[in-house]
Structure formats: structure tokens, C-alpha cells
Image (cartoon, rainbow, N blue to C red):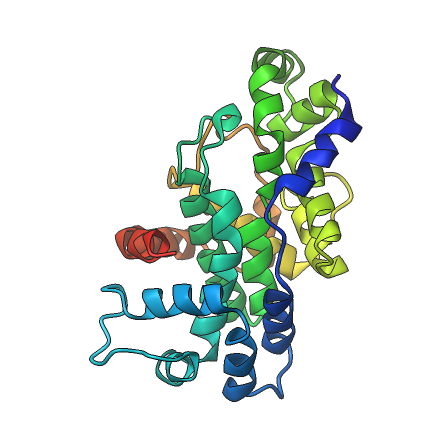
Amino acid sequence: MTDVAAILKDIDKLKPISQVTHRVMAIAGNTVSSASDLADIIEYDPALTANLLKVCNSAFFGLARKIDSIHQAVAYLGMDQVVDMVLMDLGSANLKRAQKGYDLREGELWKYSGLSALMARDIAQSKGIGDKHLVFTAALLKDIGKVVLSSHVRNYFDEIGKVIREQNITFRDAEKLIIGVDHAEVGAMAAEKWNLSGRMVDIIRNHHLGAGWNEDDMELAAVYVADTLCMIMGIGVGSDGLAYRFHPNVVEKLHFSETDLQMMMASFGEKIQEVEDLLSNE
């Protein structure tokens, strides 16, 4: 077992969440906030503003006119779209790098995280579940712990694989057994350090639905189903592969039929290139 305290110090190497992003998340969760409130906050961050304007003016959106300000961006794209773009920007710096311990090439974890976030948001919106922006952000950041643990998983990969085979346990359980901490726990600790809400921390910690999860937690269920569907589609499948247990009762709780799930995967399969184009502009 490794020195867990030393591993957790590596959380400090992640790019932290800016105060502007925190304020955008607060605005997203406040039903009385206006588009002007959102634009006023974003404009305090020059780097974020520049990146968002670059994305707005990219071929992905194909707008008829150039967008020269965040106020114009919010007016043309709407608050929800701009909030999602801010949250995507939040994840890009940490998630774009290759994670060799999980056999994920540069950009793969970022693509998977972005797609699962979009899918989780769509599930939350279609089912009228809780806060769709919270669900989006939790799905986006749920595997941030892999960025911290990647080198350690690489060093102990043979041992992890051996206990998975011999004890028939999940990849996450094997991480915990061999390394002393798993990627979901590390992700939750990072979220706590970034002063994210307790709700966000809880979803990140439990996104693989370990023992004791609340079966009535529909926000967590939306994140879990999106994660599972992305893996079934072969998106973000690294060395941990499908070494996780499937919980069919979650799908039942969300009232998804097998046809519903197939249609959702088909829909996102058609969107993958568009989403890749969007992420490549981040």
C-alpha cells in the first residue's frame, strides 16, 4: 500500500476552480438570476471570456454574425448553453492530459467527461430531476481523481489486475485495496478542497454506486446512467474497462426502457463528432 497522505498532496497540483466559476455555478442554481447577471460575472475573467468567445465564433455554432462580447453570447446562445461552456472550461485544464495509468491517451478523459456530462444533463432535464447544472458539473468532474491517481495505478497495475481476477471485485475496490484510496474518493477530496457543495462532493464520491447509496437519489442516478452508457458506447474505456458492477434497478428507477437507452446512445453516437469539435475549441 502506498503513502496515501503523499498521494493526496498531489490534489494541489490540479488547477483549482476560479472564484468566477464558483459565482457562475451559484447563478446557474438561482432561478431569479438574469442573463445580464451571468455575463457581468464572466467578464471579470479575461482568459475565460477570451476562450468562450473563441468557442462561440467557432464552426461548431456557425452563427451568422461574430460574437464580440459575453453579453452577446448569452443573448444568442442562452444562459444554459453559456453556463455549460463555462463548466466545460473548468474541466479542460485538468482532464485533457493523457492518463497513462488508466491507458487513456491525451484528450480521451476530457472527451468522455464532456460527453457523459452532456448526457447526464439531458437525462436530468428529460426526467425533471433536481438541478441539471449540478448534475452536469458532477458528471464532468466525477473522474478528476483519475488525474491524481494515474501514476500510482500505473505502478501497481499488475497487482490491481490480479486482485480483480482472484477476488472478483471492481476496479475501484481494487484501487482501494492496493493503493489505499480509490479515484472516486480522491475526486471527492478535490471537490471539497475546491469548496464545491456537499451535494457535488457526494455525487462524485458515489458515482459508481458503492455500498449504502440511496436508491432514491435521482441526481446520482442520472450521473451513473450517463457514465454507464458512455462506457457501453466505448467512450472513455481505459484500463479499468467495464470492471464495474451494473445496477439495473437504477435504470428502472428512472423509468427508462431498453428502447429508450438504445435511442439515447444512437442520438449521442450521431453527436460525437460535433461534441469533439466543441471540446477541441476549449
125 relative to 176 in the view: left or right: left
In which quadrant is the C terminus drawn? bottom left
Q: In this view, does 55 lie above or below 203?
A: below
**Based on the displayed image, in which of its 4 quarters is residue 187 positioned?**
top right
**Looking at this view, is 47 or 3 the one in front?**
47
**Whole-percent x, y for residue 184 in the image:** 66, 40
In which quadrant is the N terminus drawn? top right
**Looking at this view, is 105 or 54 the one in front?**
54
| Residue at image coords 47%, 58% | 88
| Residue at image coords 64%, 30% | 172
**Whole-percent x, y for residue 102 in the image:** 51, 27
38 relative to 218 in the view: left or right: left
Observer able to see residue 110: yes
| Residue at image coords 55%, 28% | 243
**Looking at this view, is 159 or 9 the one in front?**
9
**Whole-percent x, y for residue 53 in the image:** 36, 70
**Based on the displayed image, in which of its 4 quarters is residue 103 positioned?**
top left
